[in-house]
Each structure stands twice: as C-alpha cells, then as structure tokens.
Image (cartoon, rainbow, N blue to C red):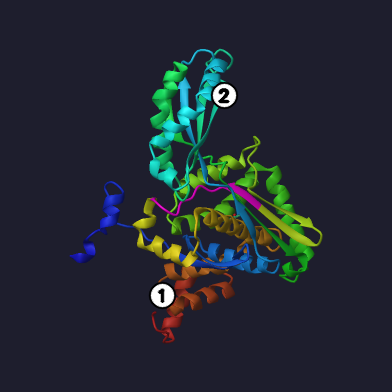
C-alpha cells in the first residue's frame, strides 16, 4: 500500500493532487562567476542543455569566466485607479502623500522592515487610454518594494491591497487591480564574458570563423523578432532549468524576461555578442525575480539539496549565476548554429533518448546511442534492431 500513498507535501501544495512528476536533475559544471566556481543543479527534460552549459562555461574560463552583477531586489506592485477626475491633479495628490502611503504599505509587513527591506518608493503613472483620446487615461500607482531574500509575490500583493483604500481616499477614485508586476525591471541581473578568439577554434575551423558565426547570430537576433524568440528560448533553457532546481517561480521569470526583451517596442535578444580587440564578448541582461526563502524552498527536499550544491548565499548571487548560465547556454547554441549547425551535437545526445525509448537501459544506452550515430540513423526502429543484435550477442539487458 505504501507505494500508492502520495507524498504529503504534494497534497498540501496544489489542489486535486494525484501524485508527483519527476524530471531529470543534472549538474552544470565548469561555471566560474566573479572568480567563484559553481556546480549548477539543473532540472530539464531536453538533452544537450546541461552539456551545452558545461561546455560553454569551460570555454569562458579561458577568458576568466563570467563577470556578473545584479540590482537590489526591488519589485514592483501595481494599483490601478479609475474615476479619479483630473489626471494631473490625482497624480499630484498621490505624490504629495507618498510618505503616508509608504508607511501604510510597510505597516503590513514589519518583519520585512526588520530584515532591511520594505516599500521604498511610490510613483503615479498615467498611461494613454486604450480607447483613444476620449477614454480615461489609466492611472497606476507603482509601489517599489525591496523584498530582500524573497521573490516577494505575496508580500507585494498584500501591500498593494493594503494601500488601496488610502489611494481611493486620496484620489476620490476607485481601485481595481492590486497585484505585482512580473516585468521586474528594477531587479536586473547582468553577466558578461570575454573569450580570446583563438580558443574558439573547433570543427577544423579557426577561432575567427567561429567568432564570426556567433557575431552574425547576434546581429540576426537583434534585427528579427522571429530569430530573437528562438535565441531567447535557448537562454531560458538554461535559466529555467536552474530556476526549477532551486524552487523558483519559473513562469514569472519567463514572463519578465520576454516582456523585458520588448522594452524598446521590438522583441530583441536578451544577449549580444561582439568582437572587441581579439576577444569575443558576450553580454546578457534580464530581470530575475528570485528568492532563497519562501515557495517550495523550505519544503522540497530536492530543492534544498540543490541549494546546498549551488552554495549561493543570496537571491542576488543566485541571479548572477543564472544570468551566466543563460549566457553559457546561448553561447553553445550560437557557436554551433553559426558554424556546423546544431543537429550534429543534438543528434548525438538525442540518440540516448532514442536508445532508452527502444528499451535500452544502463550501459546499453550509451552503446546503442553510439551505434545509432555511427549508422547515421537516429531512429527508434534502428535502435530496436541494434539492441536486439547486441542482446543476441550476449550483452546483458541492462
Ligand atoms: C533549442 O532548445 C534552443 C536553440 O534553438 C536555441 C537557439 O536557436 O539559439 C538551439
């Protein structure tokens, strides 16, 4: 009976839970950020993501690893006001009562103040009505909150709901939405690397040719949202994998990253690659609303283990590591795409999956995968044939 019992945590976490669902947990290696080495736990189902990060991080080490920095953990809460009368006057009144609004917001979370965080600033924003000139401009109060080690969603929402009655009293209007913004652009993380061009030589190509392919990939993504979406998907392959392993709200991270990618009106890549004085220079910047407390972090044993492996001491440090992982993943993708193509490496790793689908287990997975690649046919039927032949020759089934 025991094996049919649900882990108590799952039942307590979501509604109608019927079980838990496993994904592979791997370790990204070789990552060096600001002179510190990290072993990076990554949860992902796609072959090649962990290998790509580890490979890229090894190359980046040749240029001193990654340099990274991150803003203070300031999140944005939004309070939408309607029926306020004169827009300029309503904004002015809100700004004039800023200190009172901040004190009220902070009264809802004294523990956060004790930890050095809390509501820091307020801004009244006026946005054009979507219906055009005859509609009421959208008045939004932005509450800027330092959430310290928390991602902060609950705290932000509580503060936004808490100040709403005072916002209505000040403006004479009516408040509708009171919720955090996932476009956490006050909480950006940045990472960069500077790789000597000569260390890029591979596939019988000189380093300069590989660098050229990477720079062309960067230009393509800058110019074209269709390419930028795929470029950023590759970045998020790495970032999401660390986010899941460390118990983050990865949908919030995804929403923030893609909204940030559109900040100048066109969807653009989150990273760029340029050639500078004989070096390939990669840069990435994106919002990363992370926490080292709250959410599943204190209840999920695998998340706790992952945090122990990663050994970050703050959400800021975690965001720097994640930015470097995103840039690593992106480097590996554009390096292959700009030279020999992605399929060569992908198919070799995909072959393992095909071997497992065909029934191979244990050491046989690698053997069948190698045989598939040598045969140039990474197909389940072929894998079954190879597996049957190997087992006919007396290979143990696992
Ligand atoms: C696949 O999961 C990710 C890539 O498409 C990223 C890219 O094209 O840059 C390889």
Residue 283 picture location, percent across and down: 67, 53
Give the residues in magenta: 284-294
Q: Is residue 169 left or right of residue 283?
A: left
Residue 181 picture location, percent across and down: 49, 37
Q: Residue at x 42, y 29 (%)?
A: 163
Circle 2 SS class:
strand
Instruction: Specify whether tag 1 is near ligand 1 (CB below 8 Å).
Output: no
Residue 176 picture location, percent across and down: 42, 25
Circle 1 SS class:
loop
Q: Which mark is residue 73?
A: none
Q: Disc 2 designates what residue?
A: 127
Question: Dividing the picture into quarters, in which one does residue 362 lie?
Answer: bottom left
The quadrant in which the C terminus is found is bottom left
| Magenta stretch prevailing secondary structure | loop
Q: Which mark is residue 361?
A: 1
Give how far apart the Cα atoms at labels 2 and 1 are: 59 Å
Q: Residue furthest left?
A: 1
């Amino acid at each position: 009976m025991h094996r049919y019992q649900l882990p108590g945590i799952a039942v307590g976490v979501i509604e109608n839970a019927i079980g838990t669902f496993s994904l592979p947990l791997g370790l990204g290696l070789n990552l060096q950020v600001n002179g510190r080495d990290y072993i990076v736990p990554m949860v992902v189902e796609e072959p090649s993501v962990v290998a790509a990060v580890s490979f890229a991080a090894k190359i980046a080490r040749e240029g001193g690893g990654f340099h990274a920095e991150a803003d203070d953990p300031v999140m944005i809460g939004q309070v939408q006001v309607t029926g306020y009368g004169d827009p300029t006057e309503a904004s002015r009144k809100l700004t004039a009562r800023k200190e009172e609004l901040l004190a009220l917001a902070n009264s809802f979370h004294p523990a956060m103040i004790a930890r050095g965080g809390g509501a820091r600033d307020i801004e009244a924003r006026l946005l054009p009505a979507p219906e055009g000139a005859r509609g009421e401009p959208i008045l939004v109060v932005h509450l800027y909150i330092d959430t310290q080690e928390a991602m902060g969603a609950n705290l932000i929402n509580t503060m936004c709901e808490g100040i709403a009655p005072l916002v209505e009293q000040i403006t004479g209007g009516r408040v509708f939405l009171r919720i955090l913004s996932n476009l956490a652009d006050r909480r950006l993380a940045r990472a960069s690397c500077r790789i000597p061009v000569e260390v890029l030589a591979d596939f019988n190509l000189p380093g300069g040719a590989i660098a050229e392919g990477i720079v062309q990939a960067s230009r393509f993504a800058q110019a074209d949202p269709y390419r930028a979406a795929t470029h950023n998907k590759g970045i998020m392959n790495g970032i999401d994998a660390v986010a899941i392993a460390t118990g983050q709200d990865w949908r919030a991270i995804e929403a923030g990253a893609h909204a940030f990618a559109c900040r100048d009106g066109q969807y653009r890549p989150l990273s760029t690659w340029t050639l500078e004085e004989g070096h390939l220079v990669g840069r990435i910047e994106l919002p990363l609303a992370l926490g080292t407390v709250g959410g599943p972090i204190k209840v999920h044993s695998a998340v706790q283990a992952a945090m122990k492996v990663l050994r970050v001491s703050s959400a800021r440090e975690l965001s720097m590591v994640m930015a470097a992982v995103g840039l690593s993943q992106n480097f590996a993708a554009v390096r292959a795409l700009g030279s020999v193509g992605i399929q060569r490496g992908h198919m070799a790793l995909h072959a393992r999956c095909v071997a497992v689908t065909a029934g191979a287990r244990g050491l046989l997975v690698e053997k069948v995968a190698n045989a598939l690649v040598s045969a140039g046919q990474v197909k389940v039927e072929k894998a079954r044939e190879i597996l049957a032949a190997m087992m006919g020759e007396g290979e143990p089934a696992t």
